[in-house]
Image: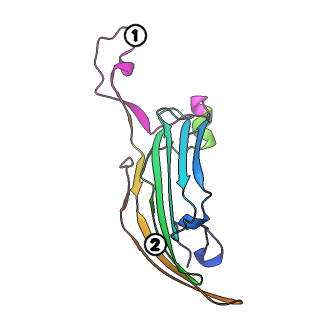
């Protein structure tokens, strides 16, 4: 069946052209500044293309960050990486290895009802956050002197490696053999009530 950690067609199948030789040759940098959860994004990609010695290499990395999200008390830090290497063994056979992962930490907003929004008068109300270890005696409001904390956080990092052998059998048939390995962890925190 379909995986909750994947995307794609019926049954969770999908095909992405992520072999090292499929990357455009050259160096590319992209920076984005937004006003939602991810305030800052940076993407760096480099691909060699297929060399005369039948090797291709590619790397890509992206960082997304927001110390303060659109909703008060939310934040996120995400890093993604990719590395690929292809070796063209002959005109009908190419061996490829790719490795990718995306460690991420997110402080989430609370799920609210219309009643909560009506009571608070705030459509961005977030009951998951507040200040901890507040120091008394601050004349400007002691709540701002503590450490900002969010009770609903997610942490995830599941690196994956895929080894692929692409074989052209004839003008009408191709055979692709894949083997993959992934490991890692996903965790979350929440209020206990």
Residue 9 — which label? Answer: none
- Numbered badge on residue 162: 2
Residue farthest toward the top in the current orientation of the protein: 139
Residue 70: image x %, image y %?
57, 34
The kind of secondary structure element at disc 2 is strand
Residue 140's tag is 1
**Residue 127 to residue 6: above or below:** above
Q: Residues within 10 Å of mark 1 (few under 14, many from 20)?
A: few
Labelled pair 1, 2 in contact (Cβ < 8 Å): no
Is 153 placed left or right of 176 in the picture? left
Quadrant for the N terminus in the image: bottom right
Position of residue 167 relative to residue 96, above or below, is below
Q: Which residues are magenta?
A: 119-147
Q: Residues within 10 Å of mark 2 (few under 14, many from 20)?
A: some
Q: Main secondary structure of the magenta part?
A: loop
Residue 158: quadrant of the picture: bottom left
| 26 part of magenta stretch | no
Q: Describe the colour scheme in one phrase.
A: rainbow
Determine the image quadrant of residue 163: bottom left
Q: Residue at x 59, y 82 (%)?
A: 91
Percent across and percent down for residue 150 are 40, 38
Q: Position of residue 24 (x, y in %)?
A: 62, 57
Look at the image and tell me whether residue 51 can be seen. Answer: yes
């Amino acid at each position: 069946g379909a995986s909750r950690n994947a995307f794609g067609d019926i049954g969770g199948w999908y095909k992405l052209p992520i072999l090292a030789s499929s990357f455009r040759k050259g160096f590319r940098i992209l920076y984005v500044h937004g006003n939602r959860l991810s305030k800052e994004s940076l993407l760096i990609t480099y691909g060699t293309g297929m060399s005369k010695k039948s090797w291709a290499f590619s790397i890509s990395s992206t960082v997304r960050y927001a110390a303060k999200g659109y909703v008060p008390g939310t934040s996120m830090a995400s890093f993604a990486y990719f590395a690929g290497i292809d070796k063209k063994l002959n005109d009908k056979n190419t061996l490829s290895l790719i490795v990718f992962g995306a460690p991420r930490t997110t402080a989430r907003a609370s799920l609210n009802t219309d009643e909560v929004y009506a009571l608070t008068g705030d459509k961005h109300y977030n009951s998951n956050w507040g200040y901890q270890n507040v120091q008394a005696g601050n004349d400007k409001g002691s709540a701002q002197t503590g450490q900002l904390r969010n009770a609903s956080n997610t942490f995830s990092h599941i690196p994956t490696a895929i080894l692929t052998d692409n074989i052209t059998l004839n003008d009408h048939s191709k055979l692709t053999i894949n083997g993959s390995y992934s490991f890692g962890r996903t965790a979350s925190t929440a209020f206990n009530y």
